Image (cartoon, rainbow, N blue to C red):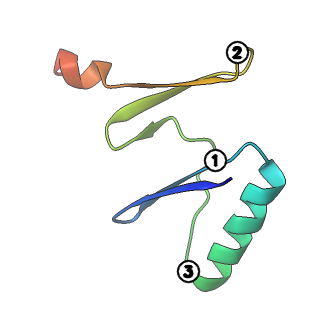
Amino acid sequence: MIILMLYMHDMLIACWNISKTNELKGMLNSEFDMKDLGAAKKILGMEIKRDGENESLYLSQGKYIEGT
C-alpha cells in the first residue's frame, strides 16, 4: 500500500517499501515538475517524528499550540 497525500502544491508519500516509493516518484516526475526534498520533517504545520526502533510515526502541533 502507498499513501499519497496532496494539498495544493505539497505532496507526502508514505510506504513501507522504498522501491515502490521510488517507482511512484519516478512515474510522477515523468509527468510533473517535481522536487524531492527528502524525508519530511513538517507538513501543513505539523511536525513529523519517526521512531524506527518501534516502527512508529508521530504527528505534533506543539508549536501551533504554544503560539510560536
Closer to us: mark 1 or mark 2? 2
In the picture as drawn, the residue positioned furthest to the right comes out as 19
Q: Would residue 55 be found to the left or right of residue 60 on screen?
A: right
Chain-order first, disc 1 or disc 3: 3
Chain-order first, disc 1 or disc 2: 1
| Residue 54 point in image, percent of width and height | 70, 15
Q: Which residue does the image show at 20% across and 19% down from the upper left?
A: 65
Instruction: Tell me the quarter of the picture where residue 22 sits.
Output: bottom right
Does residue 68 appear in the picture of this structure? no
The residue that disc 2 covers is 54
**Label 2 crowd bin: few (<14), some (14–19), many (20+), radius 10 Å:** few
Measured in 3D between alpha carbons, the distance from the residue under mark 1 to the one under mark 3, in whole angstroms, is: 17 Å
Q: The disc labelled 2 sits on which kind of residue?
A: Asn
The residue that disc 1 covers is 38
Q: Secondary structure at mark 1?
A: loop
In the picture as drawn, the residue positioned furthest to the left comes out as 67
Q: Nearer the viewer, residue 21 or 47?
A: 21
In the picture as drawn, the residue positioned furthest to the front comes out as 1
Q: Secondary structure at mark 2?
A: loop
- Quadrant of the drawing holding the C terminus: top left
Numbered circles on residues, count = 3
Q: Which mark is residue 32?
A: 3
Q: Would residue 3 be found to the left or right of residue 54 on screen?
A: left
Does residue 6 appear in the picture of this structure? yes
Measured in 3D between alpha carbons, the distance from the residue under mark 1 to the one under mark 2, in whole angstroms, is: 21 Å
| 25 vs 48: above or below | below
| Residue 52 point in image, percent of width and height | 72, 21
Q: Which residue does the image show at 67% across and 82% down from the upper left?
A: 30
